Amino acid sequence: MPLWQWILDAVAAVLVLVLLYGIALVVRRRLLSRNGGTFELSYRVRSAGSGRGWLLGIGRYSGDQLEWFRIFSLWPRPKRSWPRVELSYANQREPEGVERMSLFGDHVVVTCTSPEGEVELAMSPSSLTGFQAWLEAAPPGTQMIL
């Protein structure tokens, strides 16, 4: 078989794999959102460096947990999870500098405190309203544990 046919077969195989990966991402997103309560949520994994360390993802409320899934991963379980009683809203700000390129267009950066330290999340203003309502809707008598 000539070299050009090998190259053509390899390109076709790569295109099929990319298509399958895309379909798997769509199916995963549908499965995650089948019970509702999902929204675009970015998480800052590293705070070293200005505007760096952001990962795009999907947030989901699951009872008293906020679960975060990486957007381009096929893993069915959340990468991070925060119990409602451990999160406390601190403030919000607009994305600065490089963050504008790293995050979705209309998202705001939200800073929360937890026993592990500061947690930075980015979400749309309407998702922020839902997030604040979810935090405030904790059952009576529960307090943040620090």
Image (cartoon, helix red, strand yellow):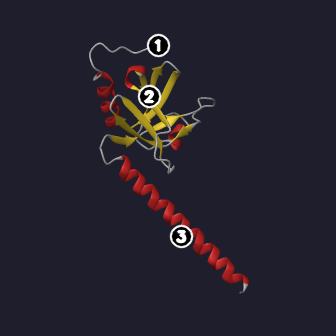
Which residue, given by chain and number where applicable, does mark 2 sit on? 82
Asked if residue 114 lies left or right of residue 63, the reply is right
Type of amino acid under label 1 = Leu
Which residue, given by chain and number where applicable, does mark 3 sit on? 16
Q: Earlier in the sequence, mark 2 or mark 3?
A: 3
Relative to 142, residue 111 above or below = below
Q: Is residue 93 visible?
A: no
Q: Is residue 75 visible?
A: yes
Q: Earlier in the sequence, mark 2 or mark 1?
A: 2
Type of amino acid under label 3 = Val
Which residue, given by chain and number where applicable, does mark 1 sit on? 146
Cα distance, mark 2 to mark 3? 37 Å
Of 21 and 127, which appears nearest the observer? 21
Which residue does the image show at 67% across and 77% down from the upper left? 7
Type of amino acid under label 2 = Trp
SS assignment at label 3: helix
Mark 1 touches mark 3? (CB < 8 Å) = no
Residue 99 image position (x, y, % from top left): 53, 37
